Amino acid sequence: MTESKSLARLEMFSDGVFAIAITLLILEIKVPPIETIHSTDDLINELFHLWPSYFAFVYSFGGILVQWIIHHNTFCHMDKTSRPFLYANGFLLLTIVFFPFPTALLAEYIDTEYAMPAIAFYGMASVVNSFGWFLFIRTIEKPRRLLNDAFSPEQYDQLKKSNRFAFVIYISTALLAIWFPFIALSINIAVWLLWIWLSLNERE
Amino acid sequence: MTESKSLARLEMFSDGVFAIAITLLILEIKVPPIETIHSTDDLINELFHLWPSYFAFVYSFGGILVQWIIHHNTFCHMDKTSRPFLYANGFLLLTIVFFPFPTALLAEYIDTEYAMPAIAFYGMASVVNSFGWFLFIRTIEKPRRLLNDAFSPEQYDQLKKSNRFAFVIYISTALLAIWFPFIALSINIAVWLLWIWLSLNERE
Amino acid sequence: MTESKSLARLEMFSDGVFAIAITLLILEIKVPPIETIHSTDDLINELFHLWPSYFAFVYSFGGILVQWIIHHNTFCHMDKTSRPFLYANGFLLLTIVFFPFPTALLAEYIDTEYAMPAIAFYGMASVVNSFGWFLFIRTIEKPRRLLNDAFSPEQYDQLKKSNRFAFVIYISTALLAIWFPFIALSINIAVWLLWIWLSLNERE
Amino acid sequence: MTESKSLARLEMFSDGVFAIAITLLILEIKVPPIETIHSTDDLINELFHLWPSYFAFVYSFGGILVQWIIHHNTFCHMDKTSRPFLYANGFLLLTIVFFPFPTALLAEYIDTEYAMPAIAFYGMASVVNSFGWFLFIRTIEKPRRLLNDAFSPEQYDQLKKSNRFAFVIYISTALLAIWFPFIALSINIAVWLLWIWLSLNERE
């Protein structure tokens, strides 16, 4: 089998899944039903009250985009693939594809008194997602190294360290959310901003 | 016509269809409507009671992923295409694209007393899907051989044998489901786990 | 600009649109709502009564697949692009993307006494789709020829003839549908079968 | 990292997002529910009364298509990428992915007395979209030039001028829409037609 062709197709399939998952997020923003609108002001108010949907959309879009960029960068340094990696990547994609659901949940409940389970659930989805990255990072090194030599051990350690950090943060905030949902969410948003900031300024 | 370019585009189109079908599965998991929620505990319970949706999502995701990997591997060994293959592949894609429907059906009914038709229907969708694979496998060999020589007769026989096995299993369990739906489903899950296990450990 | 790179990206974008449109068709098949089900037999009956949805799904899937194959074949013989072609192709894609709507309409109404408008509407969508092909076929020849020499004038004439035939058939049956909807639909199904049959047996 | 491979994957991902966003537009056109139909004429009327949906679909489809063509053309002249560009492109995609929502809003309300907020909201989405283009255009030149030399300073100025024009038009019409929604919409449609016209006749 030509390794590079096989890798290219895996990349294309993964890109497709990322692209679709990120686009399906928009389906959670629902047009206010016309039966509930009795004046122009009503509609304006409804459009403002959709802020949880806008927030959840931007939050998840950013989260998936950052992950796509990391995925993209790692693939740029790979030159072969393996069966365990195929499945680790598949599991990672499963956790990405899942995001539209907790996103819609967050949008629906964040502005209600039942926000806690929605925030904690989103947090748990992030934990599982981090675990997907853990498998991804592991299988690009074992059972056989799939990376080319341009990818330095420092970069690999950096990847592992970021993953461990994400894992700890998401587990802690998912637990914290049970008692202090909005503090947990605020920490997650801060991490999200930090993540984008670091990624934006990273030397390539 | 440049054979390889034509094949590459078929691959890309098929990958797109696989990627979209696998991602649309998430749309079957519906956010609990806010009207039914009267306390934080209500929402937590509702999120637990969505287990049939989570199960159906993971089950179908895994099923489509394994199929994508087989599809991907076979294409890696092909160097041309033919009209009958184009249509066999199209029919196979139709059966893949269909899965979000039986998945949603399973998610809705598996936890009710009307589980039987949902399980049997999913089984029948798998039978038709196996038939799609049968046509796919046949048309890569006839009317003209589309595989390159790196693909050994043993691998081809293996493909045929797996297909025959899947066909027999899915027909049997679809019938069995009429009387013993949960035993049939359990067998299918066991086959699913076996499938992923074998695929994960396959020598490439 | 590198012509071939530009063409390759147009191909990829078009493939993506075809792949998504063909996959979104599945969303029109709706799971029977649990409130309407009071016994296992109810669910079995409901699954049988979804036949219009299954039919509409297969019919539109086949229709889009055949069009993708023609699109794919034509692109295989092109080596450049032009602005008018970019827009003609874009309009053609618009008519393809539209199909999930008349498909869902057909599925909802074909088995009711209000089938006529649904059948006629689907027919009109096909007329507009044929017009999209007309623009596509025209702009690959004018204002400048985008095809390479491997594409013979006979093949081009064949393409034009098929398009004219489709145009006449769809206009006639869309009109006929006003008085005899099921005869019109039967003719369209016969043409659909003929189309797939011819395409399947075409020499490449 | 191989610059061109990285760029190619970014292109593919962006194409995927464009293709999906443009295709999801069709989901806003809803089949008239059968409970509201009591005669064939009812269904015919309902299909006519869906004109706001058809209009919004074609309008947004055209808008996204023109943007894809500009995106496509710019990428054809690029030979590398940068972190800030990756994020600028990501933000542009976010604004593209958002369009199915204002499109559905427009379709639902344009034919009611509450049209104003829908038109103004669509206008604001266009403003944010123009801002996405502003970042895109800026980051292909700074902090480092990503364009190859075949892209002349005149072409770059043209891009910037078009962007500034779009920005001014959309801000003005979004404001104007508060008092004269239909005049604002008419101006936007005129600009839309002009845009397609200019793009169609542009020398490449």
Image (cartoon, coloured by chain):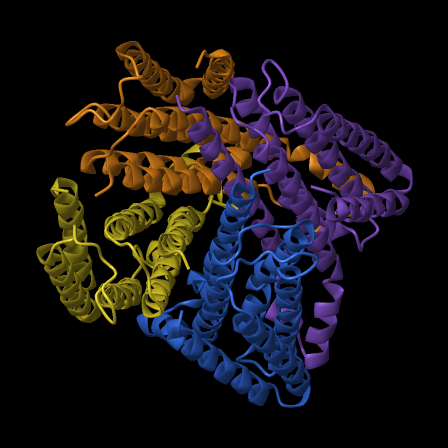
Chain colours: A yellow, B blue, C purple, D orange
Q: Indicate whether C12 appears above or below C149.
A: below
Residue C200 placement (x, y as % from top left) = 74, 49
Q: Residue at x 11, y 61 (%)?
A: A157
Left-right relation of D126 to A170: right
Left-right relation of A189 to C52: left
Q: Indicate whether A146 appears above or below C129.
A: below
Residue A166 placement (x, y as % from top left) = 17, 62
Q: Nearer the viewer, residue B85 or A71?
A: B85
Q: Indicate whether B204 appears above or below C118.
A: below
Q: Which quadrant of the structure image shows residue B55? A: bottom left
Q: Residue at x 23, y 51 (%)?
A: A77
Q: Nearer the viewer, residue D116 or D62?
A: D62
Left-right relation of A100 to D23: left
Q: Quadrant of the C terminus of chain B?
A: bottom left
Residue B27 in view in this figure:
no
Q: Quadrant of the N terminus of chain B?
A: top right
Residue B98 placement (x, y as % from top left) = 60, 61
Q: Nearer the viewer, residue C159 or B161?
A: B161
Q: Which quadrant of the structure image shows residue C203? A: top right
Q: Residue at x 28, y 66 (%)?
A: A132
Residue C96 in view in this figure:
yes
Count up the numbered dots: 0
Left-right relation of C137 to C76: right
Residue A83 placement (x, y as % from top left) = 36, 68
Which residue lies most toward the top here? D154
